[in-house]
Every structure is written in structure tokens, then in C-alpha cells.
Image (cartoon, coloured by chain):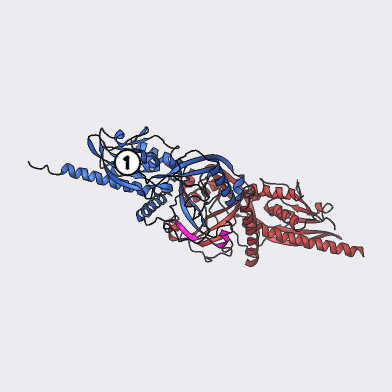
């Protein structure tokens, strides 16, 4: 049985791994193939800082909060494994800052040590009068994606470097399940007006004295349109751009200035930090994650597509929960096929 | 006395910070730092520089608390400024974990560090051998950067610095009006202080840049302190040992103890071993003394014996020593005006 996965970002690779881990012993003929035109380090996931943190509110989408929790718990469980460093996984504490009191986030009990900021701590951040402190996780795409790729390669999963133009293209010849993890470009495979880019631009600097993440929030401008500083294992990411509907992957001088000035205002010592890189990426934003099955005509046969895209600015945060859900959908496809295969043939 | 000439002997953390404090409180003083060692070869350079106070048995808690508070406030302001990276001062959060619940769950400094609270059950799961813990955010002074920054500030304030071994404080009588003794462990020989004793500390400095949080065992012996470029792994407290040679068996023991607190350290690279002798004393000696030889007098201010707690209280004791220098100057001016009558 051949399964094609479109997309080699964090969603594609983790979904592939999850499915292979769960089903390869049940389905001896299971063969997975990953198709993508971009592989690490050129995917959207590689550009992300890698901080585990959902948006401030799930707007009632409890399922997404559960997937976030599943991911956090899964990663926390890996913290003491020898693989943690190779995965790019480590603990990090930091600050979320606001100009007014806000309700606690839906993830307050998922992270470690969540609490409000003390007045003394707020002195560090003039202009902000309220905030949170908590310990969360970093999962750096530039380490995690190669790690996932290695695990998949060890398991015999094949990789194909090509731009897929349609589901039909990767199916046929025994491929009748396609995992659509195409992120921001899912609309090219099947129109989805709900999927829109949430363009971000980040500056990577050398600032090894920064040991905390600092995320500011401007409730009027919306998520990630306010400066943030996220220290990684090698570089510190400065950001604060979220432009809905902007498809440009070119760096903008105006956005550079906005990020630089606002982050230096937040942390004056950053003025001395050396800039090593700059990057723009498109968060695959959607009102909710599309994680569902769809029956599709693939050539002469009825096939199945499992959609798993639209994770906005929280792909890393939610990835494992979604991978497990995608694996469950795959499992239900298998179950239906087996039942269909063993169903008694109608007597004529 | 128009421009009192002050010699500060010792160029570690205490010498440099005391000299700087003197230039601030007594701008008319001419300050000279004399030392046989400068950064990166001082005891201070070996230490991680974490602001987690040591408790001195013979000093009232309110005085230790005052010293810590002054130091924390001073460094907090630097960490918040554009000079933070040059000065090597940064905030760091983490955990202090205990195998058995300590007698004092709230140390005297808990309201000075940031966000001090008990660790949650979920956080303690990471430390299966430990039953209790404290989470807080504090400051770290990276050396050499901090010492070099102090030297830069001193030069800007007009202070001079010379490499010179001072074998006897009286050597300085003819050139200086007041001598400030910040010689750390050297005070044992220089002023014959038998209450001063070394507590040998061996540490490892490793490359493990994914570590952003400190972890310290409440026994003070095992700790992981992420700095700007290196993580300091410790340590030992060997009372009475004068050996400055790294010990391989000790190094392995430190590494193993730290790995059991933080398994990812197995992947640490570029391990460097360092040794320092903590200049320990039941109480830090911050004190005025007037040495005399016949009718000749030499005012001395002592500021040494900080043991394991130098970084945590350095600015507080520097300020106190500078204040004592001020008193010496007043005394000299008083006696010189009496001499005129």
C-alpha cells in the first residue's frame, strides 16, 4: 500500500513519521513517499523561531487546544531523551507583555510555571503594564526537520523533489491515499479561499546574552504584529510582522526597520547585536486547521486525501497532535478498506 | 588634602568594583589599581558570576540583604541598558532543587530576585531525585566581560591600573595616602589574616548553547549556569585546599552530576576545566584600620573574604568600602588641619 505525502515541512514530515510508526507493522506493504518542491532548510517551518506557544485564544476551537497540549506533552516527554539536542528541543522561559490586563490564555495549564509578572519584572519593559511568565519549549525547525528526515529515511520512506500540481499526479500505481500537507500553497492543489498568507519577516541576530523569549502584544494590531525576541540555540530571532493577504516572500526594508527599531526599543542591548540573516515567510493562516478526509477521484479509482494544512503561526506548536489525528484518519481508512475487503460478496 | 591618592590593591571583582565606587563617591581622589593579576587571570574569572547569595554566618542578615539588594539593583539597571552585552550582564531564569525540603523555604533574598516561587509538581517531574524546588529569575555577570567593562569605566574616570606585586602594604606609604586591600586570598599573606582560608572550587566551562535555564542543587555543589558563550558546570567546595591544578577525576564527577540534572549535557562540546580558590571567611572583612610604624600612620580599608558570595554582594561591599575611604579622607583632613595649628 503506497501513501503519498505532499509537503516536507513540519506537518508533512511529522505526519509521515506518525503514520509509519503506527501502521508499518500492521500493513507490511506500507510504503510512504514524500513529495515536495522545498525541503529543509527552505521550508516555512525552517524560518520559524520554533517556540511552542499557541495564539492567545483558541476562539472555542477546543480541538486545536487539545492538539497543542498533545504536542507539548509529547515534546516534554522527549526532553530527557538523548535525541533532544539533535531534535533541536530545549526548555526556555520568557515573557508575554501587554499594555492592559488580559484573561489568562487557554494554554496556561499546559506550559510550566505559568504566572503573572511582578511589578519589578514589568520595570524591565517600559510601556507594558501587564504580562505573563512561563516556561515552554523550543523546537528548532532547522534541527527538527533534518531529524525527522533521518528517522523517515531509516524507515525506508522515499523522498521526491518535485512540485506537485495535482493530487492525481502523485497517485496511481497503488497510491490511493494522499496526505495533503502543502501548507500555504494548498490552494494550488484545491482552491481554498479560507487559506490566506499571514506574511512574517524576521531578522536573525547574534545575541547570546538573551536567555528568555519576549513576546509583546498589541491587541489592536493583532497577533505577531508587535515586537518579539526569541533566542535560539545559535541565533536570536527578532520579529513582529503579520500581514494578512500579503504573498510576498521578499524582505521589505520598511518591515526590517519596524522590527529592528521596535525590538531595540524593547531590549536596548540589541543595538549592539550583529545581524546575520533576514527572512520572510508565509504563515498558512486559516480560520481553523483543515484536518479531514476527502474522497477524491484519482484516475480510475476512488482515493482518499487526508488534508492537514492551515496551521497559521502555530504549526510547530500543534504539529504532533495533528499528526496523531491524521494517523487516526488513516487508520479509519484502513479499517474501512479491510471491512470492504472481507465483506461477504452479494449472492446473485 | 586636595586630591587624596588612593591605592586599591587587587584587580579582581572586588578590587575593580571598589575602585570604581571610590571614583564615584570621591571624584577628587586619584585612584590607582595595583595587582599582580588582571582579568582573565583572577579568581573572579573562574566563577560563573551568578547572583545567588551565600549566607555568611557572622554577618547580620539585614546587612547581607542590603549588600545583595544594592548589587542586584545596580546590575539590573545595567542589564536593562544598551551596555548590557558589553558589560556581560544578563538575566537568567531557572530552578534551585532540593533532595529534601530545606529548613528555610524562603531565603532572605527571595524578595530581591525576580518572580521567586516554589516549583510546581509538573516542574519537579523533571528532577525525579528532588522533592522540592524554587523557581526564580536572577542576574549573571559574565567574566571576563564584566571585569573588562569595569576596567574601561575606571579608565574613563581617570583611574590608573598597573601590574605590580605588592608584598607589603607599607611599600605604598610614600606614594599613596590611603590603601584599599582587595586582595582576596592574597590577604592571608599580605596582612597575615589567619581567619581567611581557601575553599577550592573546580568548574567546567562547556559549549552547550541550547541551555537557557540555570539548575542548581540546593546543596550548592552541583550547578549548571548558562552564560553568554559558555555554560559553567560545577562544582566543588574543598575547604583548605590550595591546589590550583585541575583534577581529572573531579572533572568527570562534576560532569556526571550535572548530566544527571540535565541529560542533554552529554552533547556538550569544548570542555574546559578551571580552578579557583574562594577567599573564605566567617564574615567578609569590610573594615578601616590604621597601620602604624612608630609615628608613621597608614590608613587602610579592607574589603576581602567574600568566599562563595563575591558576585552577589560586590557592589554593596564596594560602596561600604568607598564610604570607609571617605571616612579616612575626613580623618586625614581633620588631622592635617590640626597639624597646622
Residue B2: image location, x then y, percent? 85, 57
Residue B227 seen in the figure: no
SS at mark 1? strand
Q: Quadrant of the C terminus of chain A?
A: top left
Comparing B73 with B14, the one in front is B73
Residues drawn in magenta:
A109-127
Residue pointed to by mark 1: A179
- The chain coloured red is B
B28 left or right of A81 in image: right
Residue B63 counted in the magenta span? no
- The chain coloured blue is A
Comparing B135 with B273, the one in front is B135
Residue A71 seen in the figure: yes
Q: Quadrant of residue A66?
A: bottom left
Residue B198: image location, x then y, percent? 64, 54
Which residue extends farthest left? Answer: A348
Report the chain holding disc 1: A
Please tell me whether residue B304 is drawn above or below residue A178 in the rendered image.
Answer: below
Residue B174: image location, x then y, percent? 84, 52
Which residue extends farthest right? Answer: B341
A26 left or right of A161 in image: left
Residue A126 counted in the magenta span? yes
How many numbered marks are there?
1
Residue B259: image location, x then y, percent? 48, 49
Amino acid at each position: 500500500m503506497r501513501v503519498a505525502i505532499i509537503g516536507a515541512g513540519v506537518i508533512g514530515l511529522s505526519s509521515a513519521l506518525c503514520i509509519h510508526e503506527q501502521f508499518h507493522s500492521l500493513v507490511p506493504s506500507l510504503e510512504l513517499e514524500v513529495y515536495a518542491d522545498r525541503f529543509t532548510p527552505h521550508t516555512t517551518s525552517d524560518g520559524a523561531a520554533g517556540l511552542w506557544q499557541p495564539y492567545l485564544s483558541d476562539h472555542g476551537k477546543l480541538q486545536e487546544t487539545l492538539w497543542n497540549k498533545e504536542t507539548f506533552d509529547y515534546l516534554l516527554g522527549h526532553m530527557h531523551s538523548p535525541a533532544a539536542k539533535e531534535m533541536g528541543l530545549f526548555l526556555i522561559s520568557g515573557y508575554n507583555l501587554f499594555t492592559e490586563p488580559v484573561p489568562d490564555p487557554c494554554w496556561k495549564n499546559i506550559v510550566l510555571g505559568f504566572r503573572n509578572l511582578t511589578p519589578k519584572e514589568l520595570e524591565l519593559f517600559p510601556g507594558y503594564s501587564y504580562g505573563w511568565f512561563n516556561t515552554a519549549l523550543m523546537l528548532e525547525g532547522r534541527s527538527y526537520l533534518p531529524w525527522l528526515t533521518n528517522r523517515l529515511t531509516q524507515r525506508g520512506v522515499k523522498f521526491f523533489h518535485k512540485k506537485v500540481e495535482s493530487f492525481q499526479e502523485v497517485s496511481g500505481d497503488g497510491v490511493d491515499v494522499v496526505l495533503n500537507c502543502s501548507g500555504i500553497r494548498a490552494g494550488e492543489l484545491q482552491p481554498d479561499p479560507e487559506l490566506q498568507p499571514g506574511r512574517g519577516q524576521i531578522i536573525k541576530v547574534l545575541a547570546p546574552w538573551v536567555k528568555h523569549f519576549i513576546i509583546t502584544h498589541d491587541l489592536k494590531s493583532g497577533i505577531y504584529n508587535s515586537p518579539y525576541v526569541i533566542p535560539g540555540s545559535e541565533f536570536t530571532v527578532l520579529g513582529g510582522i503579520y500581514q494578512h493577504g500579503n504573498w510576498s516572500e521578499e524582505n521589505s526594508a520598511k518591515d526590517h526597520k519596524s522590527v529592528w527599531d521596535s525590538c531595540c526599543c524593547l531590549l536596548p542591548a540589541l543595538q549592539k547585536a550583529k545581524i546575520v540573516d533576514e527572512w520572510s515567510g508565509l504563515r498558512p493562516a486559516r480560520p481553523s486547521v483543515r484536518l479531514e478526509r476527502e474522497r477524491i477521484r484519482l484516475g480510475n479509482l476512488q482515493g482518499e486525501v487526508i488534508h492537514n494544512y492551515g496551521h497559521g503561526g502555530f504549526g510547530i506548536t500543534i504539529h504532533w497532535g495533528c499528526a496523531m489525528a491524521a494517523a487516526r484518519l488513516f487508520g479509519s481508512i484502513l479499517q474501512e478498506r479491510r471491512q470492504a475487503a472481507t465483506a461477504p460478496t452479494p449472492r446473485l | 588634602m586636595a586630591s587624596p591618592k588612593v591605592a586599591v590593591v587587587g584587580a579582581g571583582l572586588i578590587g575593580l568594583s571598589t575602585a570604581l565606587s571610590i571614583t564615584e563617591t570621591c571624584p577628587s581622589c586619584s585612584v590607582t589599581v595595583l595587582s599582580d593579576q588582571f582579568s582573565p587571570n583572577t579568581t573572579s574569572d573562574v566563577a560563573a558570576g551568578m547572583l545567588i547569595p551565600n549566607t555568611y554566618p557572622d554577618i547580620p542578615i539585614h546587612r547581607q540583604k542590603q549588600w545583595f539588594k544594592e548589587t542586584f539593583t545596580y546590575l539590573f539597571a545595567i542589564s536593562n541598558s544598551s551596555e548590557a552585552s558589553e558589560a556581560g550582564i544578563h538575566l537568567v531564569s531557572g530552578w534551585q532543587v532540593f533532595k529534601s525540603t530545606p529548613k528555610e523555604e524562603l531565603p532572605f533574598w527571595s524578595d530581591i530576585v525576580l518572580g521567586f516561587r516554589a516549583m510546581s509538581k509538573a516542574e519537579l517531574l523533571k528532577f525525579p531525585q528532588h522533592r522540592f524546588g524554587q523557581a526564580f529569575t536572577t542576574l549573571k555577570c559574565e567574566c571576563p566581560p564584566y571585569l573588562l567593562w569595569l576596567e574601561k569605566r575606571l579608565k574613563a574616570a581617570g583611574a590608573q591600573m598597573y601590574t605590580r606585586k605588592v608584598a607589603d602594604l607599607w611599600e605604598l606609604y610614600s606614594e599613596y595616602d590611603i590603601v584599599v586591600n582587595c586582595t582576596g586570598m592574597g590577604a592571608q599573606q599580605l596582612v597575615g589574616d589567619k581567619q581567611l582560608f581557601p575553599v577550592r572550587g573546580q568548574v567546567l566551562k562547556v559549549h552547550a548553547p541550547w541551555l537557557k535555564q540555570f539548575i542548581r542543587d540546593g546543596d550548592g555543589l552541583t550547578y549548571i549556569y548558562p552564560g553568554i558563550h559558555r555554560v559553567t558546570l560545577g562544582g566543588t567546595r574543598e575547604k583548605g585546599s590550595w591546589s590550583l591544578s585541575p583534577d581529572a577525576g573531579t572533572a568527570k564527577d562534576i560532569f556526571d552530576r550535572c548530566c544527571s540534572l540535565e541529560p542533554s549535557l552529554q552533547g556538550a562540546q569544548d570542555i574546559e576545566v578551571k580552578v579557583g580558590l574562594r577567599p573564605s571567611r566567617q564574615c567578609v572583612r569590610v573594615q578601616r584600620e590604621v597601620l602604624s610604624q612608630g609615628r608613621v600612620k597608614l590608613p587602610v580599608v579592607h574589603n576581602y573574604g567574600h568566599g562563595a558570595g563575591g558576585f552577589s554582594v560586590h557592589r554593596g561591599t564596594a560602596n561600604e568600602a568607598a564610604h570607609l575611604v571617605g571616612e579616612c579622607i575626613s580623618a586625614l583632613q581633620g588631622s592635617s588641619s590640626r597639624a597646622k595649628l
